[in-house]
Amino acid sequence: MVSRHTPARLILFTLALTASINIHAQDTVDEPAEELSIRKGKVLLGSYFNFSIATVEKTRANSLDTKSDVLKAGINLTGGKMLSDHWGILLIAGYSQSSTTTPVSVGSINTVFEDFKEDYTIAPAVRYYKLISDATYFFVQGTVFVSRGSSTSDEINGNNKVNVKLKTQGFGVGISPGFSYFMTDKLSTEISIGVLGYSIISGEDDQGNKTVAKTFQSLLYLNSVSLGFVYYL
């Protein structure tokens, strides 16, 4: 025998179940989605330290062997903005210097040649980000740069060692990959390794001495590393 209170209980149960479903649905809608560290509208402010080291050894059967050590280091200041969740534009201002030492022997001259170069650069860039884990992004950056600077280099003129000083200017393009790891929601440490690019640097002094250096660099040369910290506002 069915109790006369059963319909009322069914109605109350149905209302309670409906209310529970509505509350759960409302909580699901109102729950904020997790925000990505890199997204449209973010402003980038950062600083990078970059360096490269190279050693060139020459072995000659009929003359003295030579060994050149090349050290290049610099610092970049970077600012930019994300145009979408993946694409950003940057402006990079940088300073770099390099030095080379080479023991040489020409005739009766046994000495050490020293070269020193410094450059100031401005480089607009475009960067693409890809999220690969909760706190890590892979990126690829394309850059165009212009530079001005100076160089001094030791050379042989006849039987004399002379030092040539030049004012330099140059331009180049490059593509480099890297990773951004977020230590906090806004602060990341970044590393960029290698570069695929082309550059031309030329210089001339008041006496008509000229130097032109054309460089193509591929990703096979991974001795070029940039390390930095970037703050995403």
Image: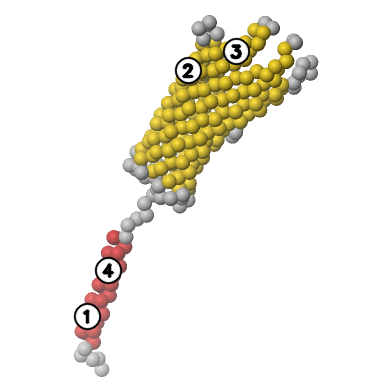
Tell me the CA gap for discs 1 and 4: 18 Å
Q: Nearer the viewer, mark 1 or mark 2?
A: 2
Please tell me how crowded label 3 is: few (under 14), some (14-19), or many (20+) other residues with Cα within 10 Å. some
Q: Which residue is mark 1?
A: 11
In front: 188, or 17? 188
Query: What label does residue 163 carry, if any?
Result: 3
Pointer 4: residues within 10 angstroms few (<14), some, or many (20+)? Answer: few
Residue 10 appears left or right of 45 = left
Q: Quadrant of residue 3?
A: bottom left
Q: Is residue 219 visible?
A: no
**What amino acid is at disc 2?**
Gln
Report helix, strand or loop for mark 3.
strand
Name which residue lies at 57% across and 28% down.
72
Please name whichever residue, 141 or 95, is drawn nearer the observer in this view of the structure. Answer: 95
Disc 1, SS: helix
Q: Give the answer, above or below, for where 182 lies relative to 14.
A: above
Q: Quick check: marks 1 and 2 in contact, CB under 8 Å? A: no
| Mark 1 neighbour class, 10 Å CA radius: few under 14, some 14 to 19, many 20 or more | few
Q: Residue at x 23, y 76 (%)?
A: 15
Q: Could you tell which of marks 1 and 2 lies nearer the N-terminus?
A: 1
Task: Give the image quarter of residue 64.
Answer: top right
Any part of residue 154 in sight: yes
> What separation in Å lies between label 3 and label 2 (alpha carbons)?
19 Å
Q: Say which residue label 2 marks.
A: 169
Measuring from the top left, give residue 42's x and y in whole percent.
35, 42
Q: Nearer the viewer, residue 110 or 40?
A: 110
Sequence-first disc among 4 and 3:
4
Q: Which residue is mark 4?
A: 23
Q: Are marks 3 and 2 in contact (CB under 8 Å)?
A: no
